[in-house]
Amino acid sequence: PNPEALGLAYNRLAAALLHLRGEEEALSLLRKEDQLIIAANGEEHPARFHNLVDTSAVLLDTRRFAEASVLLHRALSIAASAGMQGLPATVVAINNLGEAEDGLGRHGEGLSRFDEALAIAERAYGPRHWMAGMLRVNRARALLGAGRLREALVDAERGLGVVEETLPADHDFVGRALHGLGLVRLALCQPARAVPPLTRAHGLLERRGTVHEVAQVRVALAQALWSAGEPSTHVRRLAEDARDSFLAAGARARAEEVGRWLERPRGCAGTTTHPR
């Protein structure tokens, strides 16, 4: 078969598998597509840039930040060689690298990447585009990880406003933006104000989010509800579901962290762990 057509088929099937939470199968197909691109066009072909960015997105969904970072540096090197620097096509790659850096605990580096991507996106699409909104949401998470809570709140609210204005109400990006705002409210010890966005985020991400996202939002909602005085039975069920999801996804450290919280639930002062 035509290598280009076969590669495209691999890519589309990978996207479908990712939607069904088949991350490992999606990664396998994307790597096969990458091998076809290299065989047909060489390692520096721009088509490989797009493949590496797609693959990095799956790695980010499974919290494999270091692997994603390596691929994204390679992708951006290919983009630079192809004269793509500063173009809108690079926004997702730069954003993904920001997410990888932030997930590795390098919040300052992540913030710099989000700022770079935001400048390109706003120049190309304007500040009220959903992409600019999501970059604000991701910027807020990096600020939260760095302990800059008031700044994080400004970006979380601004980003959510843009995303809700420009995307369908049931879009998974709306769920992610709501989750981000809830995390910031929780870190600011405002559990009653964290519960509404986290409740909405939970409803959306249960249907459309990754396994890790669903587990994370359940933990945050359990912590917010506990701090707001919710009866413990509902809180415990949410946290236990999150722990089981982390275990199923191989995130044993996060599962153990939730288990310790279940043994001795804490109020809002104990809820400022990094959202990723």
Image: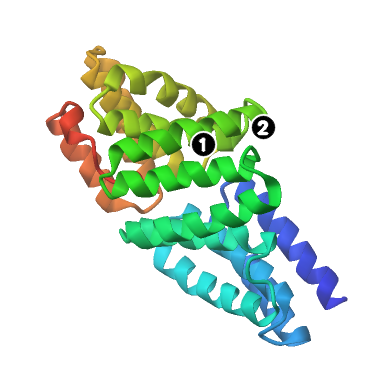
Q: Earlier in the sequence, mark 2 or mark 1?
A: 1
Q: Residue at x 45, y 41 (%)?
A: 213
| Element on which disc 1 rests | helix
> In the rendered structure, are the residues bearing label 2 and label 1 in contact, judged by CB atoms less than 8 Å apart?
no
Label 1: how many Cα within 10 Å (few below 14, some 14–19, many 20+): many
**179 to the left or right of 159:** left
In this view, 238 is above or below 74: above
The type of residue carrying mark 2 is Thr
The location of residue 261, given as percent across then percent down, is: 18, 35
Residue 64 visible within the image: no
In this view, 122 is above or below 93: above
**21 to the left or right of 255:** right
Identify which residue, 192 or 84, lies in the foreground: 84
| Residue 99 placement: quadrant | bottom left
The location of residue 210, given as percent across then percent down, is: 51, 44
Q: Residue 159: give its label.
A: 1
The quadrant of the picture occupied by the N terminus is bottom right
The location of residue 84, given as percent across then percent down, is: 68, 72
Q: Residue 77: give its label.
A: none
Q: Residue furthest right?
A: 2
Identify which residue, 272 or 84, lies in the foreground: 84
Residue 146 visible within the image: yes
| Element on which disc 2 rests | helix
In this view, 105 is above or below 188: below
- Pointer 2: what residue? 166
Q: Residue furthest front?
A: 123
| Residue 3 placement: quadrant | bottom right
Q: Residue at x 46, y 55 (%)?
A: 62
Identify which residue, 201 or 188, lies in the foreground: 188
